[in-house]
Image: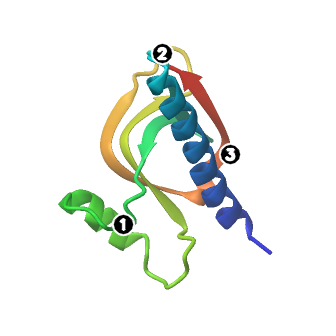
Amino acid sequence: MLDLAEFKHLSVHALDNVLKTINGGLTTQNVPAQFKLLILTNFGHIEADLDVSQGNTDDPWLLALNKAVSFNEKEIRPAIVLKNAKITPFGFNKPAHIIEQMALFSDQIVGLSFKLI
């Protein structure tokens, strides 16, 4: 049985795969609209690209983050690595923050969604 962190981790990857499949179909039909992954947390929402390289990358920062969150031999890691993360805090007139690479621990995820860009 999966624990909650593993379930959240797998859910993020599954939604990302579905959105990439839909976006690929839209691109082949010359439709400019694309869907973007949204991760809801207790502090706001994060719009980001999921890093699926699992450490197989030439980017030293992504490699460092992947190594930092893969300290055990389990296939499901306790965190997901995000690229180009736009963090928008909950609240009125709160500025958004852009972070090039980040690790988000699965226990911070409270929901998933997507938006049309």
Residue in the picture at 56% in, 46% down: 17
Residue 19 lies in quadrant? top right
Q: Is residue 45 visible?
A: no
Picture layout, residue 53 above or below residue 42: below
How many angstroms separate mark 3 from mark 1 (CA)? 22 Å
What residue would you read off at disc 2? 31
Residue in the picture at 36% in, 71% down: 68
What residue would you read off at disc 3? 110
**Of the image marks 3 and 2, the number of the one nearer the N terminus:** 2
The numbered dot on residue 66 is 1
How many angstroms separate mark 3 from mark 2 (CA)? 31 Å
Where's residue 92, x and y in %?
Answer: 54, 15
State left or right for residue 66 relative to residue 110.
Answer: left
Q: Nearer the viewer, residue 21 or 100?
A: 21
- Colour scheme used in the picture? rainbow
Residue in the picture at 40% in, 66% down: 54
Which residue is the extreme one toward the front? 29
Residue in the picture at 61% in, 42% down: 18
**Of the image marks 2 and 1, the number of the one nearer the N terminus:** 2
Q: Nearer the viewer, residue 75 or 104?
A: 75
Q: Amino acid at mark 3?
A: Val
Residue 115 lies in quadrant? top right
Picture layout, residue 89 above or below residue 20: above
**Of the image marks 3 and 1, the number of the one nearer the N terminus:** 1
Where's residue 116, x and y in %?
Answer: 55, 20
